[in-house]
Image: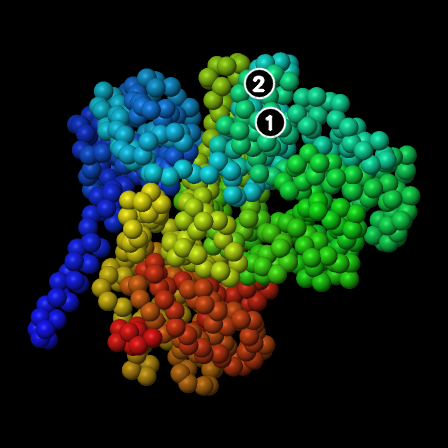
Amino acid sequence: MNNAMIINRFNVIILSVLVILLRPIAGNAQTEDYTFKLTQSTSAYQFWTTPPSERVFKTDAVPTDTGSIVKVYAAKREFEPFQIIVKPTSSGNVTVTMGSFGTGITTELFQVKYINVTTATDYLGKTGANPDPLWPIASGASISVTASQNTAFWINVYVPSTTAAGNYTTNVTIGGVAIPVRLHVFNFTLPAQLHVNSQMNFSHQTILAKYSVSGTGADYWMYVDKMKKFLIDHRLVPSSVLWSGGLTTNGAAPYIDYNCSGTFTDNEGIWGFEQPAARYLNGTGLMSSTFTQPFNGGVGFPSFMAATFQNNDASADQRPSTFCSQTRTTSDWYTGNNPSSAYNQKWFQYMTAMQNYLNAKGYLSRAYYYFANEPQNQADYDAVAWYSRYLKQYAPNLKLMVSEEPKPEIYNHANYFYNHQIDIWLPHFGLHFNPALSQQRLKNNSEESWIYFLKSTYLPRFNSITLDHPAIEGKFLGWFLWKYRVRGVAYYTFNDWSSNPWTSPNPNGQNGEMFLMYPPSEANTNITYGSNGHRFVPSIRLEMIRDGLEDYEYFYLLNGGQPQPDVSNAADAQVNKVIGMPTSYTRDSEFMYNLRRLIGLKLSGEIATIPDIAPASVHSRSNGAPGNYYINFQDPAGQPTDNPLIVNGRTYMKIGNTLYSPSLGYGWYRAADVPSANFYTAWDQWVDPEPKKLLGSAVINDYSREDVFEFDLPNGTYNVTVCVGSRSSTRYHTIVIEGVSFINSETTNNSWITRTKTVTVKDKKLSLQMGKYDQIGYINYLHIEAVPSYLLWTR
């Protein structure tokens, strides 16, 4: 065979491979458009659609792109939302009818309502009418619409596990216009068991009161079951799984009978522990014929809080003041260091008995004792370490939780005797959360971390609770948990309606704080029993949290199990396209839903590999081949005034402290708790070293927080050089770029640090995190230089 024949055959093989790789996949393309004007629009009504992670404001423009059918993708046993928006020419009423997909597939229809925000949470928030409540409506309802304003309808689709894979179509009819919807059911099933744990502080009593549920008869139990089903359907776990029964009460005191000699006895029936546990943990119990069917198809909650503290003082003895005829004194606590006192002997015997009882009933692996909240000082750390030591000594297999990040003041304490003495750390997702340390404790000590949100989960971090943030932040949650191997999430108040969420959404500085669902009356009054069809009023935030937790299950299936620390898996490459760093994310709904669809197609066996897609360009600079970019951080209108600014043959862009702008294609996500006056540009004319014009310029955060700078550019591999420093006395510096640590708490003193490393950009944005808690942030200049392709081939 001659060389020409070999080359021709090689070309044929390559062409064949390309044909296979480029073959259209189910869903028509590697990427699809999900935001478009529907071709069914008329002169009276403009119809459009967009992903559910996009909030639709009343005055949003109708898209210019067009499409003829709404596309929805779901696995079996999955809830998947979509939304259709109508913008009428004239005010009036429209009738909304939801068709049937058939084969047991169910739908719920909602109207998106608005909350008037008078004070934005932060610079990402918006004042005025913000979409969030999902108001339940019946198919065939007549809905008032306003001329030239959007009215959005939200539909939740549920696909049972018995549904055959394939395409299903139906229509949503609005104002007499039929809009087709195609549901593609993947050929796989989401696990019934939740693989993300959670602890949602949910008030059952609040629901019972607002829905006018009286007594403890059939209506009461129907609502108890309905509330728990609502939570597990959202892949969430209430803090009181067994309400209105349980195992313990205030300060971990026994709720069911305990004889003070090591024996638990449950004589409480449906109001006790064993019957609620059989239903809500095993999923099978009928609670003495209170119910006729198992709970949730026979699958219960994955965890439950077996015991907890009485108040938030972590150094205080939270146990009952009297227990088994013993009166507690200060000498029974950590300062007395007397685990053999009469009170402590009885108490730790009780802990042993609790462990043995739970083990005998088959619930020990799901139980945890949440015994301390947010230890803040040495006294707190001493108490937590001492108490957990003796709890583990007497009940080594009862899991312990403390709401704090893994803290050396605790795990290096002289009283920290046991591996996983704290089984579950529950850090606030804020300044002090260290994902690397959490993963290290998981890997080396079998200690999990969960996270919780507060109003002080400030930008640049996402906050799934914030009402006036982009809805995509709720969907980020599942992806974030996967990337950083975080095993659970908590929130301290799921449905606190003591202030009316409809009219007072910002009781404490964060819009949406304290509620993820709404009262069934906009006046926050009790409704007549059954008057709204017994339907709850969720928020867009809650639905997006579920969406992200369902995505986590996609990753679980793709990986074949839970992700492990320091072990890469098949899902990581996809997750990393969305979650770049703890403070940096791809906020592109179209990209995120396309990526999820492709993962679904892979799991469904409809494609062999997941195409390497990228987000759409936000700025034109992101198009084309990678190039070289030089940035001087300074006041663009101030010193140095050279225009253009050319130093050592390089032409520098002048970029200051401006917030990220799509039109500019660059800017900052500064820490939202930092006053704008503390995040500023600076010019020091007295700098001596060269290049003076660069070293004398800076953006500074003197509030000691983390800020993120984003710069739009083409995907590719770059050599990046960063410079930090000043003529000031000792300053600490931390710089992370695209997840790569460049400078880690290093100091300058009338000096500068210049550091070059190679990074890869996959989301068309270079993301740089500057600063750290208790460190003043400085940055002088940045070089971003594309690595030539011929050098990449040699790596």
State the residue at coordinates (23%, 46%). 25
Residue 318 percent across, percent down from the top left: 78, 42
Amino acid at the residue labelled 1: Arg
Asked whether the viewer can see residue 167, the reply is yes
Q: Please tell me how crowded label 1 is: few (under 14), some (14-19), or many (20+) other residues with Cα within 10 Å.
A: many
State the residue at coordinates (60%, 64%). 774
Residue tagged 1: 279
Residue 537 percent across, percent down from the top left: 47, 27
State the residue at coordinates (25%, 42%). 27
Q: Nearer the viewer, residue 712 or 168?
A: 168
Q: CA distance from mark 2 to mark 1?
A: 10 Å
Amino acid at the residue labelled 2: Phe
Q: Nearer the viewer, residue 684 or 247?
A: 247
For the C terminus, give its image quadrant.
bottom left
For the N terminus, give its image quadrant.
bottom left
Residue tagged 2: 291
- Can you say whether 190 is above or below 256 in the image? below
State the residue at coordinates (27%, 41%). 35
Residue 649 percent across, percent down from the top left: 29, 82
Q: Tell me the quarter of the picture where residue 220 sits.
A: top right
Q: Residue 116, labelled with which disc?
A: none
Q: Nearer the viewer, residue 581 or 304?
A: 304
- Which SS class for mark 1? helix
